[in-house]
Amino acid sequence: MSESPLLEVKNLTKRFPIKGGILSRTVGHVDAVNKVSFSINKGETLGLVGESGCGKSTLGRSLLRLIEPTSGDVIYDGINLIDLNGHDLKQIRRRVQIIFQDPYASLNPRMTVGNILTEPLEIHKLCRGPGERQKRLEQLLNFVKLPKDALNKYPHEFSGGQRQRVCIARALAVEPEFIVCDEPVSALDVSVQAQIINLLMDLQKELDLTYLFIAHDLKVVEYISKRVAVMYLGNIVEVATSKELYGSPKHPYTKALISAIPLPNPDAKHERIILEGDVPTPMNPPPGCHFHPRCRYVSEKCKLNYPEVTNQSDTHKFRCYHPLN
Amino acid sequence: MSEKVLEVRNLVTKFNTDRGAVTAVNGVSFDVYKGKTIGIVGESGSGKSVTALSIMKLIPTPPGEITDGKILFKGQDLATYSDSQMRRIRGNKISMIFQEPMTSLNPVYTVGNQIEEVIKLHQAHGLSKKDIKDKAVEMLRLVGIPSPEKRVNEYPHQLSGGMRQRVMIGMALACEPDILIADEPTTALDVTIQAQILDLMKKLQDELGMGIILITHDLGVIAETAHEVVVMYCGKIVESATVKTLFNNPQHPYTKGLLESIPSFDSTKSGEKGRLTTIEGMVPSLFNLPKGCNFQDRCFNVKDDCRGIKGPPQLEKIEANHAVSCFYPVGKESSI
C-alpha cells in the first residue's frame, strides 16, 4: 500500500434532523453516518456492505455532496471536496460520478437515450460540434455494448439490464476517474446481474476506473472488490481485503452476515449463525457498541463504550472488544 | 415418499391483452408432498408467480384465465371449483404469503385483528371471542414474535419488515393449512432477517407438516430449503429434479447457466476472480416467442433442430425424479 490514496474520507458525519409535532420542530437527530474514515486507492474497488438503514447509501451520496455532510473531510486527489463551491464543485463532479440502484427511476422517461447521454457532455462542454458528439455517443454505447440505434429510443423500450447499461454510459460520458456504484445490480435478475458485473469489471480495466461498490449482497461484493468495508448503524465495523474479511472475519457481525448468505450448494454444511432481533433504529441506537444487543459475545464493556479501531494488520481493521480468532 | 397433497397437471394460464393473448403458464405439472418443500425458480416473467396465483385461483378473470389443466388437491380438482368453494380452501387448506409484507397487511387493523379474521372465517365453531384472541396470540408466539400479548394490539407500521413477514406467516398458518405457498417470502428482507425467516419456515414445517411451494429467484435459498426444484423459463418447466440432482448435475443449458452466473462464494479465492459466466441476451417477450425451444437464442449449445423443425422440446424423464425439456441436454461431463 505504498501509493497514496485517490480518495480519503476522514470522520465523515451526516446528521439528519427528526422533525415532530405540529410546528415541525426538530425533536432529535439521526447520525446516519457517524465519523466514518476510510480510503480508496487508484484503480481499486472498495466494497461497502451492510443491511438496509445502516447508512451505506447516505455515505456514498455524502462523498459526492449529493447530500451535504454535517462534518468531516473528503479528500479527493489532494482536494477537499467539502470546501468546494460553485464552479470548482462542478469541475470535480466531472471526475466523480454515481450509478444508482434503480435503472427505472434514474432515467428521465421523456428523454431519448441520445439526449440522456448528451446532457452531461453539454453541461461540461465536452464536445465541439455535432460530428464529434455523435462519435462520442457511439463510443459510449460501444463501451456498454448497446447497439447504435439505441440513441433514438426511450428508456421504456429497454429491459432493466439495458437501462442499467444506459446509466453506466451516462456516468462514463464525462470521463470520470471514480464512480460510486450504489447497488447497481440489486434490481436485476441473476443472469443479467452477471452481465453487468462483468461489464463493470471490464470497464475498470479498460478505463482505469476506481469504484466504491455499495451493495447488500455479500456474494456480489466479494466477487468484484479487492477490499471490503462492513457498516452497521452508521459506523464501519470492519474493513479488510476480501480474502481476510471473508476468510477470517474478526467482527461477530461480519461473521454472522457471511454465514447468513444462502449458498447455492445443497451439500454445503456450514454453521449458520442466526442473529436474534432486528437492526435497531438509528434514531435511538443502543449505547456502547451498537451491535451489542444482537451479539453473542457481549460483555459489560460493550454496553458502555464504542470500541476504538484495532489494527489487525496494515489492511485489516475492526472495532470490537471481542474479536474472533 | 410421504403423502401427496397437491397435483398440478398441465396447467395453462392465459392473459388476454390489447396486444393479443399471452400464455404466462404453459403446461406446468408438479406435485407437492406433505412436509416437503418444492421450489419454483426462474427469472422475472418466467411465470412462477402466475403459477402460484393460478393454484389459489386468484388470477383476475378477465383478463386472465386458466384455460387448461387440473389442480388436484387431495383428489378434488380446484380448477372446477366455484368462488365460494374456493373461499373455503383459501387461507384454510392452502395459504399464501407474499413478497412485500407491508402491502399485504391491512394498515388500519391491528395484526391481532387480521389473524383473528382468518380464524373467525374458517374455524369459529364454538370458539368464544377470548379463545380466538388467545389463538392469535398463540400464533404470534409460534412465529417467534417477542411479547406477543402486547404485539397483538399493534398496527403493521409499528413492526419491522421481518416482524411483518412473521405476522404474515402466523396468519397463513393460523388454520394449519395443508399447503403453504410462499411467493418470494424473503426477497424484500435483509440477509440476516432472511436467515431468521427461512429458519422459522423450516421449523414450522417440521412441527405442522405442511407442504410448501417456495417461489424465488434466489438459487441459494432453494439449495438451503427445498427438497425438489422446478426451473421455469417463459412459462414452461425446463427442468425438474431433486435439489441435490439439480445442483450437482444440471441438464438444461439454462439451469446450468443460471447456476454458473451466481458469483461463486469461495473465501480462499477472494479478490482474485475472473469474469462471471453469463447467459447472453435476455428473456424473450411472451408476445413474440421463438418457434421451437424458447431458450434457443441464449443457448450455448443450440443446434438447428432447436429452431422449430422438431417443435418445442417436451419435458422428458431422464431418470427417476429428474426431467428435462431439451433436445441436447448437457451432461456433467461436458461442464467447464
Image (tube, coloured by chain):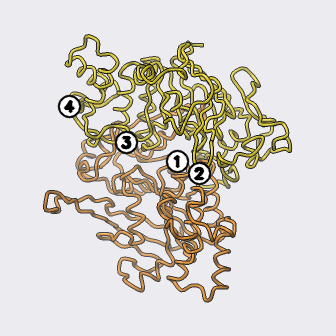
Chain colours: A orange, B yellow
Q: Quadrant location of the C terminus of chain B?
A: top right
Up the image or down, A270 lies above or below A67; here it is above
- Identity, as a three-letter code, of the amino acid under mark 3: Thr
| Left or right: A271 as drawn, with respect to B112 | right
Q: Nearer the viewer, mark 2 or mark 3?
A: 3
Do circles 2 and 3 both sit on a common chain? yes
Q: Which residue is mark 2?
A: B270
* Quarter of the figure with residue B30: top right
Circle 3 packing at 10 Å, graded few (<14), some (14-19), many (20+), is few
Do circles 1 and 2 both sit on a common chain? no
Q: CA distance from mark 3 to mark 4?
A: 23 Å
Q: Is residue A264 visible?
A: no
Q: Nearer the viewer, mark 3 or mark 1?
A: 3
Q: Tell me which chain the residue with mark 1 is part of.
A: A
* Quarter of the figure with residue B45: top right
Circle 4 packing at 10 Å, graded few (<14), some (14-19), many (20+), is few
**Which x, y percent locates residue B90?**
43, 24
Up the image or down, B245 lies above or below A245; here it is above
Q: CA distance from mark 2 to mark 4?
A: 46 Å
Q: Which residue is mark 3?
A: B103
Residue drawn at (70%, 45%), measured in percent from left and top? Answer: B289
Q: Tell me which chain the residue with mark 2 is part of.
A: B
Q: Which residue is mark 4?
A: B150
Callout 1–callout 2 Cβ contact below 8 Å: yes
